[in-house]
Image (tube, rainbow, N blue to C red):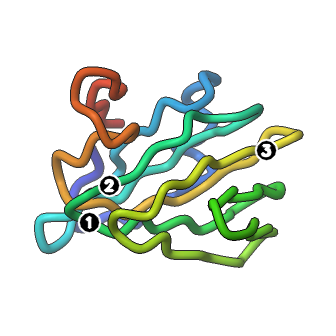
């Protein structure tokens, strides 16, 4: 991970991997991970019982499907899914996101099916 005295360049971090739906930790603050992720296609319906889910689109467009209606986001737009709310992120074309999650939060809401924590 980056030294505390160096700016974090999100585009450079995103350029280090190609895999979709596999977030990478690029920094931390107040017991939260700052993650970048490339997404394409549909993720799984899931929820986080103990924490909200923060999405900020850096590049591309995503739709966050919710049981009571969809939220579509473009570059520079963010949305917070409240804790306990089922959602399913979808991107027709590749999109790049910044996520903020409490450290240790499984990306699927379930430790058994979550991606491993990766730092870059």
Pick whichever of labels 1 and 3 is earlier in the sequence.
Answer: 1
59 versus 92 height, above or below: below
- Farthest residue toward the right? 93
Q: Secondary structure at mark 1?
A: loop
Say the numbered circle drawn on residue 51.
Answer: 1
Tell me the quadrant of the picture where the N terminus can be found.
Answer: top left
Rendering quarter of residue 101: bottom left
Say the numbered circle drawn on residue 24.
Answer: none
Could you tell me residue 70's position as x and y percent? 75, 66
Q: CA distance from mark 3 to mark 2?
A: 20 Å
Q: Nearer the viewer, mark 3 or mark 2?
A: 2
86 versus 45 height, above or below: below
Residue at 33% across, 28% down: 114
Rendering quarter of residue 116: top left
11 versus 102 height, above or below: above
Q: Nearer the viewer, mark 1 or mark 3?
A: 1
61 versus 90 height, above or below: below
Say the numbered circle drawn on residue 91.
Answer: 3
In the image, taking residue 107 as reference, residue 65 lies left or right, namely: right
């Amino acid at each position: 991970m980056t030294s505390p005295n160096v700016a974090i360049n999100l585009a450079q971090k995103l350029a280090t991997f190609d895999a979709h739906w596999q977030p990478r930790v690029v920094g931390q603050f107040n017991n939260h991970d700052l993650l970048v992720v490339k997404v394409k296609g549909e993720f799984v319906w899931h929820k986080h019982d103990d924490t909200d889910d923060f999405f900020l689109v850096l590049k591309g467009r995503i739709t966050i499907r919710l049981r009571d209606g969809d939220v579509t986001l473009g570059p520079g737009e963010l949305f917070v899914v409240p804790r306990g709310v089922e959602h399913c992120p979808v991107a027709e074309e590749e999109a790049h996101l910044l996520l903020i999650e409490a450290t240790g939060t499984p990306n699927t809401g379930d430790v058994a099916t979550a991606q491993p924590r990766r730092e870059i």
